[in-house]
């Protein structure tokens, strides 16, 4: 990594002193923010040991860098501060919430949290996923698709980590291929980016129209106009809908609602239009239809999805093993490799047949007598 990237020490925040002073005054009057900062201090990283490399991706309010921390490759998400005290306070609250989520839950299919820092920049350090995003993996593979076993295996990874989040009362709200990262060997998927994640409670209302249009559940949209930031009640089943679109992408390697703008995709979803099920494996069609059902109550829980996917994956593996065994036994004497081996050993057959047959039979009897 150090051979290909020129690392430099992290630059200080560009936030002006006057704005920072206003912000600190506001935050000092907020006991919740102050309490969260005390907690983050315990998770704080040594910024002198952090060196930034290339930009991996950029979002609306953050930039993710490849980096080195204590000579270990990591990913660093830097939260962009806003210029006004109000928006800066919102960014800080979201940052504390994201750190809290990452420290609450541990799972094999969740990116490993390493540490965080508040000053001079708000940043989150996690393990570096060298396999890149699922979005890039699928794009690079086009027009081909992953084989069915790989697609189901990846879907199972996603379902397992989502079940863990929901069991801990967390809604991700932004499940999509760009937030799903692969290990370097492309064998496992891990979930990343908790910037929009929220803790689910029975009474709390949550902001609508969060996430990315093509993966958002219909209940996140409102037919009746809402003021910006206005809230309504919905639950963790929004993640199940998003999962169904990701599963469809894994099976087809196509863009959901292709050719539509975000608003057009939202309109299609609200009007109960879904991606095409043509040419998909029949065993997976009922799962997709139930996961993207219009009524959230009709969608399955992730623990049910895990059972379905596990059974399908097991069935595929059994079929594959059976097929492999059949191919071995069907080679016969007409196989070129088999014929060469027979020709090569033909001159020795007469000499060895008598001596080796009893030895073989003795081994055979010994194996079955144990």
Image (cartoon, rainbow, N blue to C red):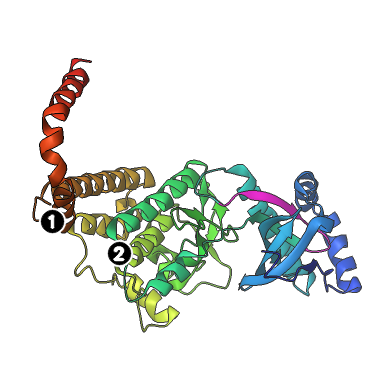
Give the residue drawn at x 38%, y 77%: 265
Horizontal side, residue 114 vs residue 184: left or right: right
Image: magenta residue range: 111-121
Circle 1 residues within 10 Å: few <14, some 14–19, many ≥20: few
The residue labelled by disc 1 is: 335
The residue labelled by disc 2 is: 251
Q: For numbered disc 2, what is the local secondary structure?
A: helix
Task: Work out how far the residue at label 2 is from the one at label 1, CA to CA, in angstroms.
Answer: 35 Å
Q: Which mark is on residue 21? A: none
Q: Is residue 42 above or below residue 4?
A: above
Horizontal side, residue 171 vs residue 253: left or right: right
Task: Pick the quarter of the image with the N terminus.
Answer: bottom right
Give the residue drawn at x 50%, y 67%: 178
Residue 242 placement (x, y as % from top left)? 40, 61
Label 2 or label 1, whichever comes before in sequence order: 2
**Observer-nearest of 301 and 56:** 56
Give the residue drawn at x 80%, y 47%: 41
Q: Quadrant of residue 143?
A: bottom left
Viewer can see residue 61: no
**Outermost residue to the top:** 369
Viewer can see residue 219: yes
Q: For numbered disc 1, what is the local secondary structure?
A: loop
Q: Quadrant of residue 20?
A: bottom right
Residue 305 placement (x, y as % from top left)? 33, 48
Give the residue drawn at x 8%, y 56%: 334
- Asked if the residue under mark 1 is in contact with the one under mark 2, i.e. CB atoms within 8 Å, the reply is no
Horizontal side, residue 182 vs residue 145: left or right: right
**Observer-nearest of 115 and 18:** 115
**Observer-nearest of 47 and 88:** 47
Task: Pick the quarter of the image with the C terminus.
Answer: top left
Residue 238 placement (x, y as % from top left)? 42, 58
**Observer-nearest of 110 and 128:** 128
């Amino acid at each position: 990594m150090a051979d290909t990237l020129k690392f430099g020490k992290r630059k200080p925040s560009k936030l002006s002193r006057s704005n920072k002073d206003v912000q600190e005054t506001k935050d000092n009057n907020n006991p919740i923010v102050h309490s969260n900062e005390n907690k983050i201090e315990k998770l704080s990283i040594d910024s002198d040991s952090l060196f930034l490399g290339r930009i991996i991706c950029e979002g609306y309010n953050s930039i993710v860098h490849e980096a080195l921390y204590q000579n270990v490759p990591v990913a660093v998400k830097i939260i962009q501060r806003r210029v006004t005290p109000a928006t800066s306070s919102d960014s800080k609250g979201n940052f504390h919430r994201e750190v809290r989520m990452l420290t609450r839950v541990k799972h094999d299919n969740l990116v490993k949290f390493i540490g965080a820092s508040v000053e001079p920049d708000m940043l989150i350090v996690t393990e570096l996923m060298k396999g890149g995003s699922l979005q890039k993996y699928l794009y690079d593979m086009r027009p081909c698709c992953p084989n069915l076993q790989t697609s189901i295996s990846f879907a199972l990874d996603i379902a397992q980590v989502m079940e863990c989040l929901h069991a801990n009362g967390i809604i991700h709200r932004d499940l999509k291929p760009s937030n799903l990262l692969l290990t370097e060997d492309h064998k496992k998927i891990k979930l990343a980016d908790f910037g929009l994640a929220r803790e689910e409670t029975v009474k709390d209302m949550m902001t609508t129209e969060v996430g990315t249009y093509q993966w958002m559940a219909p209940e996140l949209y409102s037919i009746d106009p809402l003021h910006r930031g206005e809230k309504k009640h919905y639950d963790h089943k929004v993640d199940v809908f998003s999962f169904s679109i990701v599963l469809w992408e894994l099976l087809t390697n196509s863009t959901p609602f292709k050719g539509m703008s975000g608003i057009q995709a939202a309109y299609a979803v609200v009007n109960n239009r879904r991606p095409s099920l043509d040419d998909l494996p029949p065993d997976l069609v009922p799962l997709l239809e139930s996961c993207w059902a219009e009524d959230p109550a009709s969608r399955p829980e992730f623990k049910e999805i895990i059972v379905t996917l596990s059974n399908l994956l097991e069935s595929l593996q059994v079929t594959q093993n059976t097929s492999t065994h059949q191919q071995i036994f069907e080679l016969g004497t007409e196989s070129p490799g088999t014929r060469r081996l027979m020709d090569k050993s033909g001159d020795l057959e007469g000499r060895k047949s008598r001596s080796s047959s009893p030895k073989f039979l003795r081994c055979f009897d010994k194996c079955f007598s144990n």
